[in-house]
């Protein structure tokens, strides 16, 4: 590239990059985090529960997700979701869901496996006495979990859950492989249109770095705070 | 649902004429594993160096190590892949950059992929090793010093041999992670297992057979790597220590 580093292309495209791309990335991250933690907690409860079949199913699911690459999972769901949609709505033809919903389902399902392991460790870190006192007070299994065990497990695991979310934020950039317009996708489209690959990819790296690094500092701060309370 | 299953497709000839589609996928696995092994060498060398330096007493060396770790940890893998593929050759002297860009097909993607995955994983190795070193009782290095060892000798004969044996289990999962992460290299054109499964899907429209076959191959590879590492772990575990399994976020 003989013209040197072109800052102008960044300035020209910043509006598009952040309004279209970053909005997609952040929405996807937040929704998948919420879905992933909920589904992951359910999986963790299944793994630790009394029912052998459920425990086995959840374990198999988590191990499967953790054994195959995220890119392959993204492809799987990209092609599978239209068929599942057709099956659920009894439609004769696969349903088009678009890149965003496909990605949302993928990341919720995939990250749930990782959130599950975190929540499982969190639940296992709660002393057994807590559960027994719950039962002694006449609470049911559901009440003991919802009101005694999970709130404590969740609070202990907040830093790890957030660190996983930073990883999720970075992983959403892989939706590039299904041509979604997330932040990297938007940067890549400008890069190829204007032939400014060096500028756009460097800029994307800087932006991802600033956001992830800031968040990781916040998590560290939080970790210190929680450690003091405990 | 209107999907026509055809498992026989795995035994059909692939259009490149190199054999069946199943064979085509296994060659892809070969590329995944080769990429992972080469990257693993870089990751171990660089990671050991950085991880060790971060436990020394020199403030500036520690800061430099921290900066290195933060940079490689806070940029998504695919963006790093693009940096190595598109940006890195531009930063080199022109003749060298052009030489890299003009390499024949598999290598032009293979070399950036190896560098990228190696450096990306080196940070994780460095973190594990630092944790391993810091988990050793302080008496170990004190005893070394008391016996008159220099800092280098202390690391070489007392600290590192123990630290490496302690961190073997978490390091195992990092090796499996490189094999999985090598799939990101399909974005720069490396035809590894996932890339070939996608290509097979494009040739044949048998989406689910292609991805199911790739999934099964990944699972089998996972089993083999885990079994191999179990054997190694049993051989090198430090007697008298309970391996501490920490919880952390990661892939």
Image: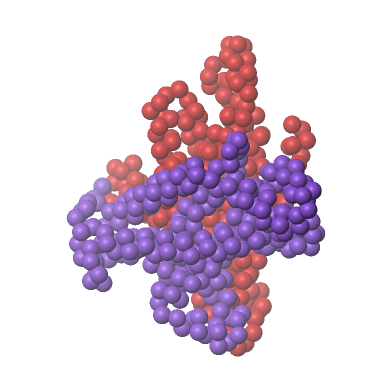
Chain colours: A red, B purple
* Rendered location of residue A218, percent (x, y): 72, 49
Numbered circles on residues, count: 0
* Rendered location of residue B3, percent (x, y): 24, 51
**Quarter of the image holding residue B15?**
bottom left
Task: Please report the residue visible at 79 percent of the width from the left and 63 percent of the height from the top.
Answer: B60
* Rendered location of residue A35, percent (x, y): 52, 42
The front one of B114 and B165 is: B165
Q: Is residue B231 visible?
A: yes
Up-down: is B59 above or below A199?
above
Task: Please report the residue visible at 65 percent of the width from the left and 61 percent of the height from the top.
Answer: B49
Q: Is residue A13 visible?
A: no
The front one of B181 and A173 is: B181
Does residue B246 appear to the left or right of B195 in the view shown?
A: right
Task: Please report the residue visible at 28 percent of the width from the left and 51 percent of the height from the top.
Answer: A93
Task: Please report the residue visible at 76 percent of the width from the left and 46 percent of the height from the top.
Answer: B143
Up-down: is B70 above or below A147?
below
Up-down: is A84 above or below B116?
above
* Rendered location of residue A176, percent (x, y): 48, 63
Up-down: is B109 above or below B214?
below
Does residue B59 appear to the left or right of A199 in the view shown?
A: right
**Quarter of the image holding residue B246?**
top right
Residue found at the far front of this picture = B147
């Amino acid at each position: 590239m003989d013209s040197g580093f072109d800052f102008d292309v960044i300035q020209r495209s910043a509006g598009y990059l952040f309004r279209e791309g970053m909005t997609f990335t952040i929405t996807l991250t937040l929704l998948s985090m919420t879905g992933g933690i909920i589904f992951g907690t359910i999986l963790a409860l299944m793994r630790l529960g009394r029912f052998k079949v459920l425990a086995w199913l959840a374990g198999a699911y988590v191990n499967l997700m953790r054994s195959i690459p995220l890119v392959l999972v993204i492809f799987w769901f990209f092609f599978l979701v239209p068929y599942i949609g057709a099956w659920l709505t009894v439609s004769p033809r696969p349903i088009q869901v678009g890149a965003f919903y496909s990605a949302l389902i993928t990341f919720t399902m995939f990250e749930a496996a990782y959130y599950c392991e975190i929540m499982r460790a969190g639940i296992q870190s709660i002393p057994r006495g807590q559960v027994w006192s719950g039962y002694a007070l006449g609470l049911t299994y559901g009440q003991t979990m919802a009101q005694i065990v999970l709130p404590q497990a969740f609070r202990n695991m907040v830093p790890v859950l957030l660190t996983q979310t930073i990883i999720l934020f970075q992983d959403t950039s892989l939706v590039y492989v299904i041509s979604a317009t997330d932040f990297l996708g938007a940067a890549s489209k400008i890069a190829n249109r204007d032939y400014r690959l060096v500028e756009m990819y460097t800029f994307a790296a800087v932006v991802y770095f600033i956001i992830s690094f800031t968040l990781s500092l916040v998590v560290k701060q939080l970790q210190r705070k929680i450690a003091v309370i405990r | 649902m209107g999907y026509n299953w055809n498992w026989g497709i795995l035994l059909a000839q692939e259009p490149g004429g190199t054999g069946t589609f199943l064979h085509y996928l296994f060659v892809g696995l070969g590329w995944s594993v080769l990429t992972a092994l080469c990257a693993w060498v870089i990751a171990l060398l660089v990671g050991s160096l950085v991880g060790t330096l971060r436990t020394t007493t020199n403030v500036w060396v520690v800061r430099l190590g921290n900066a290195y770790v933060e940079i490689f940890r806070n940029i998504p893998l695919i963006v790093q892949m693009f940096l190595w593929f598109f940006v890195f050759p531009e930063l080199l002297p022109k003749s060298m950059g052009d030489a890299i860009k003009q390499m024949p097909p598999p290598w032009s993607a293979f070399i950036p992929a190896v560098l990228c995955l190696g450096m990306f994983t080196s940070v994780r190795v460095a973190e594990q090793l630092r944790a391993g070193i810091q988990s050793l009782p302080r008496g170990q290095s004190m005893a070394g010093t008391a016996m008159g060892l220099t800092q280098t000798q202390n690391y070489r004969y007392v600290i590192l041999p123990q630290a490496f044996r302690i961190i073997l289990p978490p390091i195992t999962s990092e090796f499996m992670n490189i094999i999985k992460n090598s799939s990101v290299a399909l974005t720069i054109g490396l035809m590894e297992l996932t890339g070939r499964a996608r290509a097979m899907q494009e040739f044949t429209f048998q989406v689910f057979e292609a991805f199911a076959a790739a999934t099964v191959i990944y699972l089998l590879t996972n089993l083999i790597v885990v079994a191999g590492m179990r054997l190694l772990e049993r051989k090198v575990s430090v007697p008298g220590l309970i391996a501490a399994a920490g919880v952390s976020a990661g892939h």
